[in-house]
Image: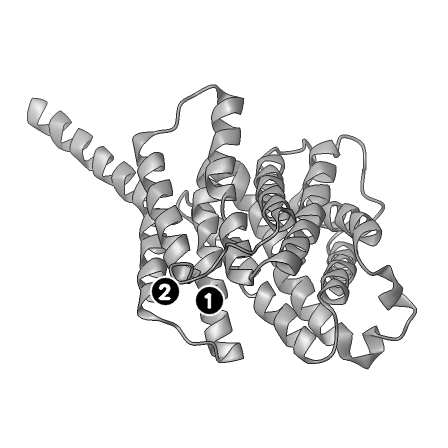
Amino acid sequence: MKAWMYPLLVVLGAASYGILSTIIKLAIQDGFTASEAVTSQYYTGFLLAFIIYILARRGMPKFRGSFPVLLAGLFTAITGTMYGKSVEYMPASLAVVLLFQFTWIGMLYECVATRRLPKKSEVVSLIFLFSGTILAAGLIDADISGIPWQGWAWGLAAAFSFAAFLTANQKPVAGMDVVTRLFLMSFYASIAITFFQSPEIVWNGKLVEGLWLYGATLGVFGIVLPIFLFSVGVPKVGAGMSSILSAVELPVAIIASMLLLGERLTILQFIGILLVLFGMTLPAMLQRFSLRTRRRLKKSGS
């Protein structure tokens, strides 16, 4: 696989996360709770991962040595739960801004782990991402004075958890392929979500009342695709750069809400989306420019 494809896989994985909030809103409009929709996401996601594993592999997976996968599964479940809690206390637009603090938190995790300072291109990229997030979320005219501290705490905790998920997901496990990793991670996540959300959907009839349709959609775009794509791309790209590339989730979430929910896109939000996209691609553009400059200097020197 060519080197440029690994960042693309991370972008596609993050983009699949972007439509989740819209699908959950559609489920709520159809009479289900956010907790029921999230639970159906993890349960159906595990079922789909199990089917993929049965079709692609034979025999029981090896659980030995899968501690990084266990951590990644736990953190993805914890992130979904904490983000849902933050939305209960504050507008979804502000909760998204808090969640997107994972961009600099993920960079901080990697800098601490590798004992290095952030690159100038990474710092500039984060500035564009943060500015674009505020504009894209429509916070310029929002009143945040009456928001309780619990909302801020849950939102920031979700950001730290998602950054930890990206960090844990970059660690390869010897002898474990992507299909097995997908199965085990979804298995661990479904167990964790049982303690945090609404496991009663399995026996109270909500699934057959139509929740399964939302669960299947959420399972594909919230479990199977992102875990599969991140499992391939993040180890090659790194957690810090993956955090920056994952910022594509916000523009996708806004566009999905506009197309499926009929929400209006303002000029400021459009400018914010452009800033986020520019901040995502800035490190790659600067790196390419640096390589071209070095090549020209070598040619002129020779």
User: Which numbered mark, 1 or 2, is in the foreground of this view?
Assistant: 2
Mark number displayed over residue 254: 1
- Residue 239: in sight, yes or no? no
Residue drawn where x is 57% and y is 54% of the image: 147
> Mark 1 or mark 2: which comes first in sequence?
1
Please state which amino acid type lies under the numbered disc 1: Ile
Residue drawn where x is 45% and y is 51% of the image: 247
Q: Quadrant of the C terminus?
A: top left
Query: Which residue appears farthest toward the right when viewing the image?
Result: 203
Mark number displayed over residue 147: none
User: x and y percent of residue 255 in the render?
Assistant: 45, 69
> How crowded is the residue under tag 2: few (<14 C-alpha within 10 Å), some, or many (20+)?
many
Mark 1 and 2 residues: CB-CB less than 8 Å, in contact?
Answer: yes
Describe the colour scheme in one phrase.
Answer: one colour
Residue drawn where x is 36% and y is 60% of the image: 273
Quarter of the rendering containing residue 72 = top right
- Residue 93: in sight, yes or no? yes
Secondary structure beneath label 2 = helix
User: x and y percent of residue 196 in the render?
Assistant: 79, 51
Mark 1–mark 2 Cα distance, whole angstroms, equals 9 Å
Left or right: where does residue 20 sit relative to residue 266?
right
Secondary structure beneath label 1 = helix
Which residue is identified by label 2? Answer: 269
State whether residue 181 is above or below residue 216.
above
Question: Closest to the observer: 293 or 128?
Answer: 128
> How crowded is the residue under tag 1: few (<14 C-alpha within 10 Å), some, or many (20+)?
many
Left or right: where does residue 72 sit relative to residue 264?
right
User: x and y percent of residue 27 in the render?
Assistant: 68, 74
Residue drawn where x is 79% and y is 60% of the image: 43
Left or right: where does residue 95 sit relative to residue 116?
right
User: x and y percent of residue 234 in the render?
Assistant: 53, 41
Please state which amino acid type lies under the numbered disc 2: Gln
